[in-house]
Image (spheres, helix red, strand yellow):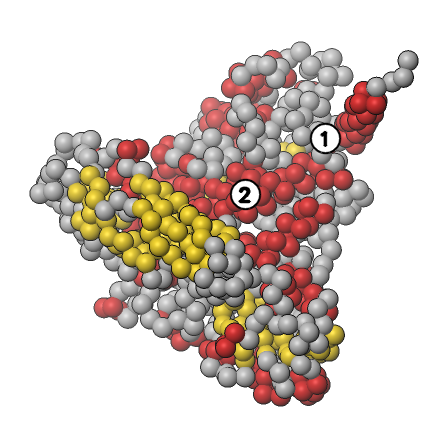
């Protein structure tokens, strides 16, 4: 009898799957509960059918105190008698699987992983579905490497701190300066990483860091290990904590990392108000809290917050810390218990949070893994690499396009001079906390696919210490039909523990740009690679510089994306996620001043677009396109009733706004408002448009703030309808000086993009009563 070809294919596929599964289980023994281990396979903690809570309780009951304590640190010790291998908690996946932490080892069948653009660049896309898709790819590759014994499943990413000060070296790792943007990015990326498995399961365990008010590494003699961030209750609730709350509430993140710095005199990793009461209590974190590496040691040895190391161990664990990145808790927790500063129940609570996450990951299920099919062939796939390219394209921001100089026509500009210290770089493109990319396409290589190139660095490295090589660069510009200058920064200028001193281009870069622009016979395009903003006022004012592009750190395919934008294969749609300030702004704002609001009495100009009213080089949310978009409000309410759910009247009301109702005193679920905006592409090129919705509330201290955004692709001459849901409790509320979120009664103004405004009246039956 002839065999059914379909059955043959199924049998062959099953055989391949079984062989792959066998290979994976041979290359990496199960974390625990190996079915071949007769001593443990029937223990309750190994039964996947039981509730995780019961499995965790059973396992903790089998451990000695010393075994428990050695599991409270990142390099958790094995418990061989129970078949439990050691585990390294510290892995990184900021914008791709990274070997920055000890948990990931590239090599063998996993020589690299897809390296996406740095976070500040993908944030400029304002595309939540893109952020989630990147997270899904990163977690696919992370699971594949875990199956191959090359990585763990707990990743201490993303970094969702607010990019408060333009000098911050780690601003590149964040989604920018706006709380709403950072919150949306945080929740989206976490969802992509952790997956949507049923039954409280996790694909990988993400971690939102660094909680909270952390955005200074080393500036003017002050470092993060000794810095006490003095933050008002208003700024904490209104700005710094917003993305962390979104991580927990919306992203359902499995972990939060506390930071090195103190907040109002208390180390964050030993502050029960921040950890136990807020993250665990108010926000109801379903997961664990981890210290930044050695921060428990720092609070004792550098900040001298406690008199003994045992006190430090006790204070951090009792405050809500579960895991220490570093050896401190392994060394001093038992002593704290002996001195009656801590009890074993405190250790059990912390360990229970850790084991629960590991069981949600399936690490106590033996080889029965839901993602066991992922392997080397699922890393650096063509689809993953194309997503890295697409992410770079979407994150690029066109800042200037004088007289429509761009896009270039390959037929007209046959020879292009490619000049600058970042014109043919590789590692610079991927930023920090990166792994080993699948490959690189530099700007020079990307442009070479469209035109013949003449290449000169002009100066190197990016610090551009002298002008001795400017001459050949000027000659190249005279010979070419057009010139592309690829300038900017690198990790030698901005990175972790290296905050910038100024906002100008480093060294002699400005001189190189001006001299080459003057010499060029054709149009000049200035491309900037950086994480933080750069004061390029000189370039804006130079009539010889036709266009300015910010590419951020665009990842492994960055050069191809830059070329695609320059030659019009891609219509740029990115928008700046941070304000670009002039250099003189810095003299008015010490990095150590954490205040967000402006204070004219002391000459303090305020921070970010929400509170700063001075001149900018480029504003938050700015970005040009090769086409024109028009927005029209098709539908939206004009009057909304906000009900009271509490009759409690506050007698001593000192609000900054009139008739502000506490968010906790109204029914937020009943206040979902829908708006429909028609977006028309009035140009002759297909493009993507970011519909940005800002709100201005009555008597608020900021002119307007971003509350929602949607990305839409519109073909030339067509129109698309965009729906935006507005939640007054979230989007129209403001925070008073006591840190209480309230909804002001009265007329609110909604700004749809630049030109379209719509007023909406919020009212209630008891407007004369102030709650």
Q: Is residue 67 above or below residue 194?
A: above
User: How many labels were placed on the picture?
Assistant: 2
Residue at the farthest right position: 1
Figure quadrant of residue 730: top left
**Marks 1/2: CA–CA distance:** 21 Å
Task: Give the crowd class for mark 2: few <14, some 14-19, many >=20 residues within 10 Å.
Answer: many
- The residue labelled by disc 1 is 373
Residue at 37% x, 32% y: name it: 281
Q: Is residue 593 above or below residue 649?
A: below
Residue at the farthest front position: 717
Q: Is residue 677 above or below residue 47?
A: below
Figure quadrant of residue 50: top right
> Which of the labelled discs sits on residue 389, or is there none?
none
For mark 1, give the secondary structure: loop
Task: Give the crowd class for mark 1: few <14, some 14-19, many >=20 residues within 10 Å.
Answer: some
How far from the left and from the top, in percent, is residue 711? 47, 51
For mark 2, give the secondary structure: helix
In the shown orientation, is residue 266 left or right of residue 684? Answer: left
In the shown orientation, is residue 375 left or right of residue 336? Answer: right
- The residue labelled by disc 2 is 132
How far from the left and from the top, in percent, is residue 31? 68, 27
Q: Identify which residue, 525 or 137, lies in the foreground.
A: 525
How far from the left and from the top, in percent, is residue 150? 73, 39
Residue at 72% x, 59% y: name it: 440
In the shown orientation, is residue 691 left or right of residue 727? Answer: right
């Amino acid at each position: 009898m002839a065999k059914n070809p379909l059955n043959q294919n199924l049998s062959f596929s099953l055989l391949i799957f079984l062989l792959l599964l066998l290979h994976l289980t041979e290359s990496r023994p199960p974390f625990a509960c190996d079915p071949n281990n007769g001593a443990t396979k029937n223990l309750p903690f190994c039964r996947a059918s039981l509730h995780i809570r019961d499995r965790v309780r059973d396992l903790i009951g089998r451990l000695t105190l010393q075994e428990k304590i050695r599991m409270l640190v990142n390099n958790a010790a094995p418990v061989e008698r129970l078949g439990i291998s050691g585990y390294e908690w510290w892995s990184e996946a900021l914008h791709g699987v990274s070997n920055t932490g000890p948990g990931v080892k590239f090599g063998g069948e996993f020589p690299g992983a897809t390296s996406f653009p740095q976070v500040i660049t993908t944030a400029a896309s304002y595309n939540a579905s893109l952020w989630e898709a990147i997270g899904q790819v990163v977690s696919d590759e992370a699971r594949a490497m875990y199956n191959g014994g090359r990585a763990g499943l707990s990743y201490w990413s993303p970094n969702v701190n607010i990019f408060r000060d333009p000098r911050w070296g780690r601003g590149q790792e964040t989604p920018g300066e706006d709380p709403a943007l950072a919150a949306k990015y945080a929740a989206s990326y976490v969802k992509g990483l952790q997956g949507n498995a049923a039954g409280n399961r996790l694909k990988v365990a993400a971690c939102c860091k660094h909680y909270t008010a952390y955005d200074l590494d080393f500036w003017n003699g002050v470092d993060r290990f000794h810095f006490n961030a003095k933050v008002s209750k208003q700024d904490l609730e209104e700005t710094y904590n917003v993305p962390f709350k979104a991580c927990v509430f919306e992203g359902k993140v499995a972990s939060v990392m506390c930071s090195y710095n103190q907040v109002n005199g208390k180390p964050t990793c030993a502050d029960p108000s921040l950890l136990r009461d807020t993250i665990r209590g108010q926000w109801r974190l379903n997961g664990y809290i981890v210290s930044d590496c050695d921060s428990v040691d720092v609070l004792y040895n550098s900040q001298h917050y406690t008199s003994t190391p045992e006190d430090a161990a006790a204070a951090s664990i009792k405050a809500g810390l579960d895991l220490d990145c570093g050896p401190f808790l392994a060394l001093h927790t038992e002593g704290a218990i002996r001195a009656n500063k801590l009890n074993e129940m405190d250790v059990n609570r912390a360990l229970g949070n850790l084991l629960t996450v590991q069981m949600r990951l399936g690490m106590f299920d033996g080889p029965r893994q839901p993602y066991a099919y992922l392997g080397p062939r699922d890393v650096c796939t063509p689809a993953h690499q194309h997503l890295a390219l697409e992410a770079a394209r979407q994150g690029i921001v066109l800042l200037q396009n004088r007289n429509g100089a761009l896009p270039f026509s390959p037929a007209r500009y046959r020879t292009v001079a490619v000049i600058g210290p970042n014109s043919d770089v590789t590692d610079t493109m991927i930023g920090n906390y990166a792994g080993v990319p699948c490959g690189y396409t530099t700007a020079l290589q990307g442009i070479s696919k469209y035109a013949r190139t003449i290449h000169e660095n002009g100066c190197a490295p990016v610090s551009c210490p002298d002008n001795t090589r400017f001459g050949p660069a000027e000659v190249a510009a005279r010979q070419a039909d057009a010139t592309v200058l690829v300038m900017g920064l690198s990790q030698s200028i901005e990175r972790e523990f290296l905050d910038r001193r100024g906002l100008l281009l480093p060294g002699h870069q400005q001189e190189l740009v001006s001299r080459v622009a003057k010499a060029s016979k054709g149009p000049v395009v200035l491309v900037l690679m950086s994480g933080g903003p750069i004061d390029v006022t000189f370039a804006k004012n130079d009539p010889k510089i036709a266009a300015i592009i910010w590419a951020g750190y665009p990842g492994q395919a960055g050069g191809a994306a830059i070329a695609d934008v320059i030659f019009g294969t891609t219509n740029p749609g990115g928008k700046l996620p941070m304000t670009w300030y002039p250099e003189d702004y810095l003299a008015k704002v010490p990095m150590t001043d954490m205040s967000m609001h402006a204070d004219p009495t002391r000459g303090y100009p305020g921070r970010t677009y929400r509170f700063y009213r001075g001149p900018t080089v480029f504003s938050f949310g700015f970005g040009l396109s090769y086409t024109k978009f028009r927005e029209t409000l098709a539908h939206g309410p004009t009057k909304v009733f906000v009900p009271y759910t509490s009759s409690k009247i506050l007698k001593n009301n000192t609000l900054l706004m009139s008739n502000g109702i506490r968010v906790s005193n109204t029914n937020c679920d009943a206040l979902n408002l829908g708006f429909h905006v028609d977006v028309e592409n009035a140009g002759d090129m297909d493009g993507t448009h970011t519909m940005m919705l800002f709100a201005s509330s009555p008597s608020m201290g900021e002119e307007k703030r971003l509350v929602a955004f949607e990305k839409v692709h519109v073909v030339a001459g067509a129109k698309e309808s965009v729906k935006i849901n507005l939640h007054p409790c979230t989007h129209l509320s403001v925070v008073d000086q006591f840190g209480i979120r309230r909804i002001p009664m009265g007329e609110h103004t909604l700004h749809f993009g630049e030109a379209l405004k719509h007023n909406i009246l919020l009212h209630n039956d008891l407007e004369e009563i102030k709650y």
